[in-house]
Amino acid sequence: MFIAFLWAIISGNMEALSASVMNGAASAVELLISIAGIICFWSGMMEIADKGGITTFLAKLFSPILTKLFKNVNKDSPAMRYISLNISANLLGLGNAATPFGLSAMKELKTLNHNKDTASDDMLLFVVLNTASLQLIPTTLCAYRANFGSNAPYEIMPAVWLTSIVALLAGVTVAKAFSKAGG
């Protein structure tokens, strides 16, 4: 930014730089407003799902896999519930809705951690799962594509499935291989 500003002064293009900055800012605001609706909608749907017991159902559905991955976390604990909620939101491609659940999961995992100065294997594994973000419906990404004029915003779904599965498997494999507990 400093170089662009300096070059604009030297070359006498301050008007072009100013116009570019203003256009970029206006585009950013337009994008935020257009995406805010879908994020609010899906965040609200996740809240309704939580209040309606759907998230409890999903927690039970994911329980067999998650209890094998998170061996030090009780399947009925708040940590497992928040992990399930985070994964559910990520499956729907709702990274913004997943974030509060992820923060709550990490807070609960920290309470289970005996060494408060170091992240536990479960905490590290959760970060890997959250970062890999297995997605069935990449809602936010498709909303971006539609906003920018894509005629087929959902055509990327097979590529998203493949890359998120590969990222998830690679991440879990590495996390388990390097875990302090050895498995």
Image (spheres, helix red, strand yellow):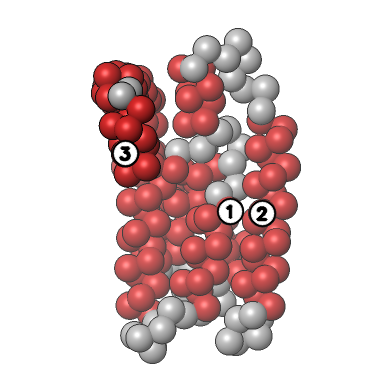
Q: Name which residue lies at 45% across and 38% down.
A: 94
Choose mark 1 or mark 3, whichever is in front. 3
Looking at the image, is 155 positioned above or below residue 131? above
Q: Is residue 43 left or right of residue 124?
A: left
Q: Earlier in the sequence, mark 1 or mark 3?
A: 3
Q: Where does the image place residue 158, in percent across and percent down from the top left?
A: 72, 33
Q: Where does the image place residue 13, in percent across and percent down from the top left?
A: 32, 23
Q: Earlier in the sequence, mark 2 or mark 3?
A: 3
Looking at the image, is 93 positioned above or below residue 15? below
How many residues crowd around disc 3 within 10 Å: few (fewer than 14), some, or many (20 or more)? Answer: few
Where does label 2 land, which residue?
167
The answer to whether residue 33 of the structure is visible from this angle is: no
Q: Quadrant location of residue 117?
A: bottom left
- Determine contact: label 1, label 3, CB under 8 Å: no
Tag 1's secondary structure? Answer: helix
Q: Name which residue lies at 51% across and 51% down.
A: 87
Q: Using the numbered discs, state the Cα–Cα distance from disc 2 to disc 3 in whole angstroms.
A: 41 Å
Q: Name which residue lies at 70% across and 59% down.
A: 169
Question: Which residue type carries mark 3?
Answer: Leu
Where does label 3 land, which residue?
6
Q: Quadrant location of residue 39?
A: top left
Quarter of the image containing the C terminus?
bottom right
- Determine contact: label 2, label 1, CB under 8 Å: yes
Q: Is residue 178 left or right of residue 5?
A: right
Q: Is residue 125 left or right of residue 52?
A: right
Q: Using the numbered discs, state the Cα–Cα distance from disc 1 to disc 3 in whole angstroms.
A: 40 Å
Mark linked to residue 132: 1
Tag 3's secondary structure? Answer: helix
